[in-house]
Image: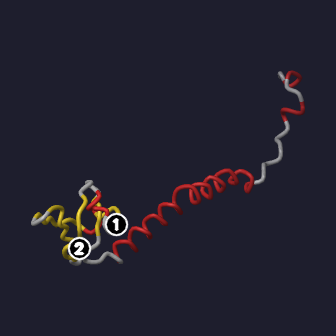
């Protein structure tokens, strides 16, 4: 009835776009997230695990809570840290955030 109002170009169905081109932005986002977020986090985790594995008695460390001290004893899951003379605390190994260079505690 109103066929004369619709132009033939709009009435025809267009060709379907390539499905690969529809998913290309999603694939690019996944690749971007991998290189910008996931890979650097994995590297930091590996470095922290290696640092905890090389921890030795006498190392000067800083905990994630900000306490600085010298490692007195190393257990399987806990580390005993001497934060002052005759003041010893136990912290989880994962709470050690960094190892200081030797002699750093005397400078504090």
Q: Secondary structure at mark 1?
A: strand
Residue that appears at 66% across and 54% down? 28
**Front one among 14 and 35:** 35
> Is the residue marked by circle 1 packed among few (<14), some (14-19), or many (20+) residues within 10 Å?
many
Marks 1 and 2, Cα distance to the nearest angstrom?
17 Å
Question: Residue 69's x, y, as percent?
Answer: 23, 63
Question: Residue 71's x, y, as percent?
Answer: 23, 71
Q: Work out which quarter of the rendered image holds the N terminus and state it.
A: top right
Q: Name which of mark 1 and mark 2 comes first in the sequence.
A: 2
Q: Which residue is mark 2?
A: 77
Residue that appears at 51% across and 60% down? 38
Residue that appears at 25% across and 54% down? 65
Q: Work out which quarter of the rendered image holds the C terminus and state it.
A: bottom left
Label 1 vs label 2, nearer the camera: 1
Q: Is residue 66 left or right of residue 16?
A: left
User: Which of the 4 quarters of the picture holds residue 105?
Assistant: bottom left
Q: Is residue 51 left or right of residue 67?
A: right
Residue that appears at 29% across and 65% down? 61
Q: Which residue is mark 1?
A: 99
Q: Secondary structure at mark 2?
A: loop
**Front one among 103 and 32:** 103
| Residue farthest front in this picture | 107
Q: Is residue 39 left or right of residue 20?
A: left
Image disc number at residue 5: none
Question: Residue 58's x, y, as percent?
Answer: 25, 74
**Front one among 15 and 32:** 32
Question: Residue 88's x, y, as percent?
Answer: 13, 66
User: Which of the 4 quarters of the picture holds residue 56?
Assistant: bottom left
């Amino acid at each position: 009835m109103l066929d004369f109002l619709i132009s033939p170009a709009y009435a025809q169905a267009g060709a379907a776009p390539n499905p690969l081109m529809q998913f290309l932005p999603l694939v690019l986002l996944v690749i971007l997230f991998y290189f910008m977020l996931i890979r650097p986090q994995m590297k930091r985790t590996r470095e922290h695990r290696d640092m905890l594995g090389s921890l030795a008695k006498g190392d000067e460390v800083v905990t994630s809570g900000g306490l600085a001290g010298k490692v007195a004893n190393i257990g399987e899951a806990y580390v005993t840290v001497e934060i002052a003379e005759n003041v010893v605390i136990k912290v989880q190994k994962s709470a050690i955030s960094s190892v200081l260079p030797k002699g750093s505690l005397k400078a504090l």
